Amino acid sequence: MGGKGSKKQRDEITFETTTDEGFTNTLKRDLHVLIAYASGADPSLQREVAERLANEAVKTERQKQIVDLGGLELLLPLTKSEDVEVKRLAAHALANLSVSADNQVKMAREGGVEMLITLLECENMHVQRQAAKALANLGVNVDNKETIATKGGIPPLIKLAQEAEEAVKIEAVAALANLAVNDDNEIAIGKLGGIEPIIECGNSRNTELLAQCSRALRNLSVDESNKGIILRSGGDHLLRELATVANDRVAAQATRALNNLGLDVARNDEGKSSNRK
């Protein structure tokens, strides 16, 4: 947006955020104007709207409000911005909004899954990370597991688990772990080549990534075909190592994955104990 008209329109908005009532009134009164900003070509206006939403969405009391008052309609054009910072802020807002169980249902119904899958394709790691985190949150909901898979969310998550920066891999593997708590998704992840990158992520020294890897392998090791993939890819050796690390989250999930495979926690074939910390 440009010109005197847009400047006047912009000056007429006071984005009240100091109270719940003020924030609610702003969205009710000016949502159509904010959508115009978000849909315009001026990155500075887009950033202003995106930053407000991202900041407000951090607050628990705001999360349901934003979605109930049309916040997703406002975020949609921001996810399509050519400005990477706007995309990052929009993805951050979506990740924060997706924490709420109520929002998880509404976001899936109102196009949030499609928004996030599109953001996964962005080359910026910060956008990828927030989008994957949001999909991991949405994937907690039983119905959303199927929705995310149907909309094509599994292949880009696998790609990120294989190729992305480590911070992104954590969120992508977490999302795959949540989606795998569904029989069809579990099989699909195996068939689409998702197990091998997760096992490869187990070479990391990042405890959070190891925790997500062991959790994902636990959820993926119920299906018989996946069990074969895990064994052929050396996943049993990795899980035995992870089952002996000091971190309880990692060790517990790895042990459960081994149980699914019909294996116990033992020393590796080489006779060496794990030196992972």
Image (tube, grey):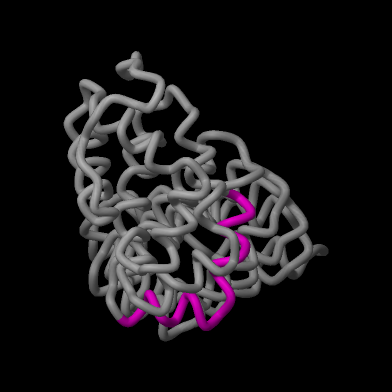
- Percent position of residue 267, x then y: 28, 25
- Name the residue rendered at 41%, 79% in the picture: 184
- Percent position of residue 39, x then y: 69, 71
Q: Quadrant of the C terminus?
A: top left
Q: Compare residues 188 and 17 and report the one nearer the observer.
A: 188
Residue 50, located in which quarter of the rendered image?
A: bottom right
Residue 265, located in which quarter of the rendered image?
A: top left
Name the magenta segment's main secondary structure. helix
- Percent position of residue 139, x then y: 36, 67
The reply to whether the magenta stretch includes residue 158 is yes
Is residue 274 at least partly visible in the picture? yes
Q: Quadrant of the N terminus?
A: bottom right
- Name the residue rendered at 34%, 61% in the picture: 178
- Name the residue rendered at 33%, 74% in the picture: 182
Q: Compare residues 190 and 118 and report the one nearer the observer.
A: 190
The reply to whether the magenta stretch includes residue 115 is no
Say above or below: 23 vs 27.
above
Residue 101, located in which quarter of the rendered image?
A: bottom left
Q: Is residue 244 left or right of residue 241?
A: left
Q: Compare residues 52 and 240 and report the one nearer the observer.
A: 240
Say above or below: 211 vs 129.
above
Q: Is residue 149 left or right of residue 117?
A: left
- Name the residue rendered at 45%, 83% in the picture: 110
Is residue 28 at least partly visible in the picture? no
- Percent position of residue 134, x then y: 43, 59
Q: Is residue 270 left or right of residue 51?
A: left
Region rendered in magenta: 143-160
Q: Tally the marks.
A: 0
Say above or below: 236 vs 71.
above
Say above or below: 97 vs 206.
below
